[in-house]
Image: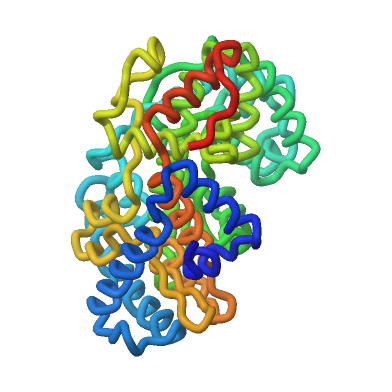
Amino acid sequence: MTRFLSESLEAPEPSFRLGLKRLEAANGNPSTDIRFTAEVNYAARAKLQQLGLDPKDTTAKELYRALEERVKVDDARLTKSLRTAAATHISAEADVVAGMIHALQTSSASMGCYALKSSAAKAIIKKLPPKKAMKQLGYRSLDSMLKHEQPVVIMAAAWLVEGDAWQHKLIDAYKRLQPADFENRSIQLLQLNGQRWQQLAARIVTERRHNLIALREMGALLFLPLPSEVAPGAVTASLSLALHELNEIRASSTLLKLSQVKKDFGNVVRMIVSDEPDLNSSLLDQPVPWHLIQRYYARLSDKFKQSVFEPYLELEDMVWHPIERALSQIESSLGFWHDSGHLGLLHDGEVVSLNIVDAALNCCNQLRFEDRVVQHFQRSLWHELLLRYLKHETVERAVSGELQPELATETVIV
């Protein structure tokens, strides 16, 4: 095991070291962790050189400041590009949020999903009237709100303003959903405008540091208004998080489609809403995030066997678009960030993330070096490592075991 992985991931020891030893032993001790560390360090040094830094003599703080400046420059270019697109294709106002939505809708990425029907969402809202949301949106009656607002918009407002008690009731209601309550359609990208949303956004964006509401079970991503003056990096952070959520919506969609055969389908819906869905099979000596399976088949499409997933999933459903490459398709000057999601520098026990989501959040929130965020880098680093230990036969066995538990063999360690 390498010190870089342990310290970068802030992993609990000795369990992390022992877990990697088991993975290595089960694979014939190929030194995957050491090879992966060398690969990451080589790629990170190359990024430092692109920034004009000396990889042999750059501290964590120096890299942090260099990334901050890089984000500011790239964010200005991206913002200009999005405003130009909005002014050209939507309205003369050159609204940057409208530009984001246009860029996402016209990208080459798949926008199909399997999501809750509007009629099913409306039925839930009738049973659980979100009274605070109704007041926030300016309605005196539930019928009037349902007549004039899309259910997805009502749900978004409810998630923002209703309390924990209402949210728990909603999740309980989801457990009773059936496949008939879902449908195949396009992911919804909605811009929430109007004075009431402006007022709500002013508070929410300040608290959450982004302007997105993702409803994975509804296949929807909603954009709150941004302030007229936004901090450098905020547009990059918002669009990067939007691309991340689109990947999560796609992964949730495939798991829901695949789970139509399960008796506890409603529990899968609840899990998608309240937590990160895992496969029950301990494929890597631990539960495996479903989106890791999604990424596996998106990367190794030749390994996909229709017989394992039929009749509900096809290869076209297993979509995962790297955030950095999607960004550079929107603004070509962002190519520096290609393949950097799992890269970081560890210097004197201090890690700095080269992940664009972390870098943009650090920049727009003007975080001190001591308060920097690195969680998106850590998540990507861990998942990239796990992907290198996945074997096709055990992936198929885990998926089959999830769908047909009665046919599953005993837990298999890779």
Q: Residue at x 35, y 64 (%)?
A: 40
On the image, the x and y values in percent for residue 80 come to 26, 64
Residue 414 percent location from the top left of the image? 48, 37
Residue 385 appears left or right of 162 = left
Which is more toward the observer, 180 or 43?
43
Residue found 60% across the figure and 11% down from its top = 406
Quarter of the rendering containing residue 129: top right
Q: Can residue 291 be seen in this view?
A: yes
Q: Residue 401: x percent and y percent?
A: 53, 20
Relative horizontal placement of residue 40, taking residue 155 as reference (left or right):
left
Q: In this view, does 410 lie above or below 45?
A: above
Q: What residue appears at the point 44 percent right and 53 percent down from the top-left corner?
A: 241
Q: Nearer the viewer, residue 139 or 413?
A: 413
Please indicate, yes or no, whether residue 193 appears anywhere in the rendered image: no
Position of residue 215 relative to residue 99, above or below, is: above
Q: Percent x, y for residue 108?
A: 23, 39
Residue drawn where x is 46% and y is 81% of the image: 347
